[in-house]
Image: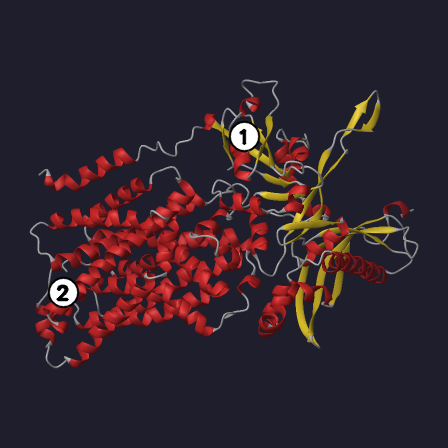
């Protein structure tokens, strides 16, 4: 890729890619499986996820100027690579749809109940399409702004909920047992896969790669800390039994946040601080989808592909969220399972093949075959 | 050239069409802002009766003074709570809006029947604040919502402000919808809700004589629930004890007798009340120890004493601890033996401290086991200083 981004912007991308859906919707799915252990289950899953994020960064460091799509051709051959590209297009399309629907649920259920869902989805798709068409560099810049707002949002939420915080709600830790915690960790892969597979596409944009592995590691750790704060506070404040009742748990938490007597409601503050992060997440998923699709279908003008693809994905988004309950069920099964298989399996396969074919493929021959989007 | 700007033009066009804001537009002059709501269950027809107190903004407009009442109170019935609320639209000229509701008053008959519809409606309605106060009243909620009470222009404001000062008398707890919802949903904690009474406390001047007149809403006592139904009320003293253990009350003022005949009192202001609960196994049953510690000061002393300051403080500390322990034990007696409702989260404590036993032995039979759990209360009071020093004002000479 010709576009480059700074380490700070790259660092901020991780938190944005994990944040939006995980803090409310995934937390709700996990709490329905393991109750008050939601935060420990998510923490374990995120720590496991970091291993695969590091694996992807390691592969990226082997082929510093190539995307995952490019080096998979070298490692797996043209046709096998194309098969995986098709899977990735489907994955990124669904990833966009789940990300966009996270915002749709927030707006539809809490702020604009009378507004038609299709209007929210089309408007959001148009904005994301516009952002994507400006390029990955613009998305990463917005990502840094979103990152700052996320931290501010977390601080506000901590202060707003501290009076209702009950440590008793978090105990006993590992109430359902470590095995159940591990099993429920699969639900977090619906979010972790955004980073693992997204990293395969965006890695080449990092301008200085001398400490890329270390930056990736600390970015993942920081993102984990920022995200896990939410199920931790939600469980302590609302209690697991209340969390189970809601599809968007974070909004329910925010409904109870009272920033002094003079700010009795915080829903709009939340949406204003949170929407930037979701925008970055959705934009990056759409960008990755278009980028991967371009590898399968060669077109002269990029927008000949991106515009109709965006419309199709917007329709997919609408079909997915028509029934809110079915959408939430989809996020429990089969989405996280499929995302886990792809985000664990594909990097592992590439890594194993890279070890086997190490001698056959010279590093020089790899770096020369740069495929500029 | 046109293609260069195609993206921008298309985004602007879509925004123009979709961002008109028509769908969820609500003009302030079209809304009826609910300030308080009371919910009763009609015993005869088994219908929900919803009474709303709605603010009339024009009556508060100083530039255009009006002799109208500042609120409009109305009532409607329905087979479901939702239907009753929708039935208000039959005669309300404005759309009912819940975002500014300050208090939900649950009628006694409704509370004894089932509060599930109330919890369901108000927690799933995104308009409503989760910090809205909730109380169970003695009698019909309709009377409380329609009573002119307190000093504020809107009676609902007066009633809701009581919840901000409940700790001054420490004879009630305060319950918001999020706390009630949390306890209602919990497997191991039962709801304990603020209680309201109507008392003729307002003093009226009548031909030069003062006499008790109109009713005022009083926040006092608590309502004990078991799952979805209210079982009964607790006295103010029991409520103080339970509120302390539930960490709902952290300060209190007590009148402490200093002699055996209980004729001479000192007023003790307690603050920083801290509670620690622990459990241990005693044979087959777990036992619970509640340690309460607090500091305080003597704020009123109307009699002289021959005791030294240290001895006097020690005497007051012991007596205060005795009263506090008595309040807590009375409260526990009521909820554990009389109502058999675990409002103090004893079950949660056992779950945390004896997890394996909880799942294997206690969880399935908890309602039978809970009334037999021995609970010990230890109270420590530290009088830090006496604001009256040593000699009472009227004994100085």
Q: Is residue B388 visible?
A: yes
**Whole-percent x, y for residue B185 in the image:** 56, 55
Q: Which residue is mark 1?
A: B88
Q: Which residue is mark 2?
A: A82
**Regarding mark 1 in the picture, which secondary structure is present there?**
helix
Label 2: few (<14), some or many (≥20) within 10 Å?
Answer: some
- In-image side of A303 versus B316 (left or right): left
Q: Is residue B216 above or below residue A231?
A: above
- In-image side of B161 versus B209 (left or right): left
**Whole-percent x, y for residue A9 in the image:** 27, 58
- Label 2 – label 1 distance at C-alpha: 62 Å
User: Quick one: B283 or A221, which is closer to the camera?
Assistant: B283
Q: Quadrant of residue B337?
A: bottom right
**Whole-percent x, y for residue B258 in the image:** 87, 56
Chain of the residue under the numbered disc 2 shown in the image: A
Residue A119 is tagged as: none
């Amino acid at each position: 890729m010709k576009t480059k981004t700074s380490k700070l912007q790259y660092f901020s991308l991780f938190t944005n890619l994990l944040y939006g859906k995980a803090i409310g919707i995934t937390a709700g799915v996990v709490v329905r499986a393991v109750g008050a252990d939601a935060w420990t289950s998510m923490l374990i899953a995120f720590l496991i996820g970091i291993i695969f994020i590091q694996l992807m960064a390691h592969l990226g460091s082997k082929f510093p100027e190539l995307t995952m799509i490019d080096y998979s051709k070298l490692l797996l051959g043209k046709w096998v690579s194309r098969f995986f590209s098709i899977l990735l297009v489907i994955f990124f399309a669904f990833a966009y749809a789940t990300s966009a629907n996270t915002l749709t649920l927030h707006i539809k259920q809490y702020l604009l109940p009378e507004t038609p869902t299709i209007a929210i989805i089309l408007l959001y798709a148009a904005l994301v399409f516009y952002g994507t068409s400006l390029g990955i560099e613009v998305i990463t810049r917005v990502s840094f702004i979103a990152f700052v707002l996320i931290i501010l949002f977390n601080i506000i939420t901590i202060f707003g909920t501290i009076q209702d915080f009950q440590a008793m709600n978090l105990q006993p830790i590992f109430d359902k047992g470590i095995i159940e915690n591990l099993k429920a960790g699969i639900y977090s892969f619906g979010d972790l896969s955004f980073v693992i597979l997204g990293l395969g596409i965006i890695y080449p944009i990092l301008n200085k790669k001398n400490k890329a592995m270390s930056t990736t590691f600390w970015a993942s750790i920081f993102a984990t800390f920022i995200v896990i704060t939410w199920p931790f506070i939600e469980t302590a404040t609302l209690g697991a039994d209340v969390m189970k009742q809601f599809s968007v748990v974070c909004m329910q938490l925010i409904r109870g946040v009272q920033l002094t007597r003079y700010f009795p409601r915080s829903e709009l503050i939340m949406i204003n601080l949170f929407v930037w992060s979701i925008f970055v997440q959705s934009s990056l998923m759409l960008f990755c989808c278009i980028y991967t699709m371009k590898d399968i279908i060669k077109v002269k003008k990029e927008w000949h592909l991106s515009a109709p693809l965006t419309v199709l994905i917007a329709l997919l988004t609408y079909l997915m969220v028509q029934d809110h309950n079915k959408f939430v069920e989809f996020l429990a099964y089969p989405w996280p399972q499929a995302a886990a298989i792809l985000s664990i399996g594909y990097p592992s396969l590439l890594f194993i093949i890279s070890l086997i074919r190490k001698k056959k493929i010279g590093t020089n021959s790899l770096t020369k075959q740069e495929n500029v989007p | 050239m046109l293609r260069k700007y195609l993206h921008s033009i298309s985004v602007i066009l879509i925004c123009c069409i979709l961002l008109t804001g028509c769908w969820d537009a609500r003009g302030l002059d079209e809304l009826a802002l609910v300030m308080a709501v009371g919910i009763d269950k009609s015993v005869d027809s088994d219908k929900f009766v919803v009474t709303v107190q709605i603010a009339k903004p024009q009556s508060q407009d100083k530039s255009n003074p009006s002799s109208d009442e500042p609120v409009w109170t109305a009532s409607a019935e329905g087979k479901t709570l939702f239907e009753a609320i929708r039935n208000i639209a039959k005669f309300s000229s404005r759309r009912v809006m819940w975002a500014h509701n300050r208090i939900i008053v649950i009628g006694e008959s409704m509370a004894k029947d089932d509060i599930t519809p109330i919890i369901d409606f108000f927690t799933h309605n995104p308009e409503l604040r989760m910090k809205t106060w909730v109380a169970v009243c003695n009698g019909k909620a309709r009377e409380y919502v329609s009573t002119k009470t307190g000093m504020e222009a809107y009676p609902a404001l007066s009633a809701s402000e009581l919840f901000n000062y409940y700790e001054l008398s420490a004879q009630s707890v305060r319950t918001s919808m999020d706390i009630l919802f949390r306890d209602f949903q919990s497997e191991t904690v039962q709801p304990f809700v603020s209680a309201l009474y109507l008392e003729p406390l307002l003093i009226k001047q009548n031909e030069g004589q003062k006499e008790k007149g109109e009713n005022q809403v009083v926040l006092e006592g608590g309502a004990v629930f078991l799952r979805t139904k209210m079982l009964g009320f607790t006295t103010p003293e029991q409520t103080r004890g339970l509120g302390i253990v539930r960490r709902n009350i952290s300060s209190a003022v007590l009148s402490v007798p200093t002699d055996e005949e209980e004729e001479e009192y000192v007023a003790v202001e307690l603050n920083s009340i801290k509670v620690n609960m622990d459990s241990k196994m005693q044979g087959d049953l777990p036992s619970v120890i509640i340690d309460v510690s607090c500091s305080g000061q003597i704020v009123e002393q109307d009699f002289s004493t021959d005791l030294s300051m240290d001895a006097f403080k020690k005497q007051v500390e012991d007596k205060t601890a005795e009263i506090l322990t008595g309040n807590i034990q009375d409260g526990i007696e009521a909820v554990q033996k009389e109502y058999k409702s675990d409002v103090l989260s004893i079950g949660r404590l056992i779950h945390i401290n004896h997890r394996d036993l909880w799942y294997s032995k206690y969880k399935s039979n908890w309602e039978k086991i809970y009334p037999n759990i021995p609970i010990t209360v230890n109270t420590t009071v530290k009088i830090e200083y006496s604001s009256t020093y040593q000699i009472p004002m009227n004994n100085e000479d």
